[in-house]
Image (tube, helix red, strand yellow):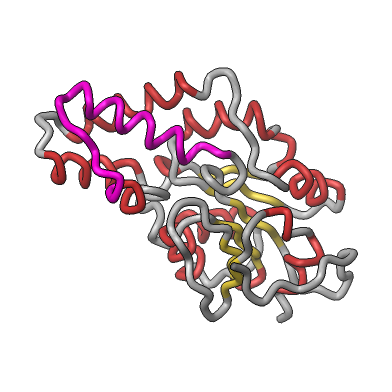
C-alpha cells in the first residue's frame, strides 16, 4: 500500500532539496534476511531457537540493541561484546561475494550521481560491514558514509542523520531520507528530515512529513525534490 506518491517526472529546478540520505540494509541492498539468517544460525549453535516474532523487533536496530534483546529473550550464555563481534564476523563472511540490490536502487543512485546531488549512506551497521557492501553499491555514488559505530548514539536516535547533514554542510530539514524500518524512520524524523519509507520487514504507517511507498521503483529525483518544498 502506498501513500501520497507524486507522479514520476523530471527533476524540479525550484526544489529546496539539498541532499539525499539513504539507509543501507533493506533499503538499498536486500540484506535484512541475511542478518536474520546469521542470528538464527548463531543462536542455534548456542542451543536456542529464535522465534519469528523476534525478527521485526531486531530489524533495523543497532547491533548492540538487537544482540542485547536476543540474549535476554533466549537466556543465552554469551557476553554482549562477544555476540556482537560474532554476528558481525559471520555477516561479513556471508556478504563477502556481493549482495543483491533492492529493486530500483541502482537506477536511483545513478540518477542522483548524474545530477550531482549530495548523497550520504547512513547505516546502523559497523564500518567493516559498510565498506564491504560499498563494493557492490559503488563508493562513487556517495559523498560520504556514516557507520553505526562512528557515532555516540545510532538509530533510532537522530545523531547519524544530524552528523551526515553537518558533514555535508546542509540543513536537516532540506534533506530527503530513504529508510525501510520504523527505527530508521524515527531517527530521520527526529533529525527533522523528510522521510520516504520503503518497508522491508515490518509495516510503517504514513505520518506527517513521511511518505510510504512499496518499492524504490516508485522513487526518483523529482519525487524526492517535491518532498522538500521549503
Task: Give the residue drawn at x 19%, y 35%.
Answer: 80
Using the rendered image of the protein, determine whether residue 74 is visible from the camera's viewpoint: yes
Task: Give the residue drawn at x 31%, y 33%.
Answer: 39
Residue 74: x, y in percent?
Answer: 14, 40
Q: Where does the N terminus fall, quadrant-wise? A: bottom right
Q: Nearer the viewer, residue 106 or 176?
A: 106
Q: Quadrant of residue 40?
A: top left
Residue 135 sits above or below residue 116 on the image: above
Q: Give the left or right position of residue 14, taking residue 162 as reference.
A: right
Q: Quadrant of residue 48?
A: top left
Task: Give the residue drawn at x 73%, y 60%.
Answer: 218
Of helix, strand and loop, which mostly describes the magenta segment?
A: helix
Q: Quadrant of residue 211?
A: bottom right
Task: Give the residue drawn at x 53%, y 72%.
Answer: 192
Residue 166: x, y in percent?
Answer: 57, 59
Which range of residues does the magenta coloring cover? 30-54
Residue 32: x, y in percent?
Answer: 47, 41
Q: Where does the C terminus fall, quadrant-wise? A: bottom right
- 227 within the magenta span: no
Amino acid at each position: 500500500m502506498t501513500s501520497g506518491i507524486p507522479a514520476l517526472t523530471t527533476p524540479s529546478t525550484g526544489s529546496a532539496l539539498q541532499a539525499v540520505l539513504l539507509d543501507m540494509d533493506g533499503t538499498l541492498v536486500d540484506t535484512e534476511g541475511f542478518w536474520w539468517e546469521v542470528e538464527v544460525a548463531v543462536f542455534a549453535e548456542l542451543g536456542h531457537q529464535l522465534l519469528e516474532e523476534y525478527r521485526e523487533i531486531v530489524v533495523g536496530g543497532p547491533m548492540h540493541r538487537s544482540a542485547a534483546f536476543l540474549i535476554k529473550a533466549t537466556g543465552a550464555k554469551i557476553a554482549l561484546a562477544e555476540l556482537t563481534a560474532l554476528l558481525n564476523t559471520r555477516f561479513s563472511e556471508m556478504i563477502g561475494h556481493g549482495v543483491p540490490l533492492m529493486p530500483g536502487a541502482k537506477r536511483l543512485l545513478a540518477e542522483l550521481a548524474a545530477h550531482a546531488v549530495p548523497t550520504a549512506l547512513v547505516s546502523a551497521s559497523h564500518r567493516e560491514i559498510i565498506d564491504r557492501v560499498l563494493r557492490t553499491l559503488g563508493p562513487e555514488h556517495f559523498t560520504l558514509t556514516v557507520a553505526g559505530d562512528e557515532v555516540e548514539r545510532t538509530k533510532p536516535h537522530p545523531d547519524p542523520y544530524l552528523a551526515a547533514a553537518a558533514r555535508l554542510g546542509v540543513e536537516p530539514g532540506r534533506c530527503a531520507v530513504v529508510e525501510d524500518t520504523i527505527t530508521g524512520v524515527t531517527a530521520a524524523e527526529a533529525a527533522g528530515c523528510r522521510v520516504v519509507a520503503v518497508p522491508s520487514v515490518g509495516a510503517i504507517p504514513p505520518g506527517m512529513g513521511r511518505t510510504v511507498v512499496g518499492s524504490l521503483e516508485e522513487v526518483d529525483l523529482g519525487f524526492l525534490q517535491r518532498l522538500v518544498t521549503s
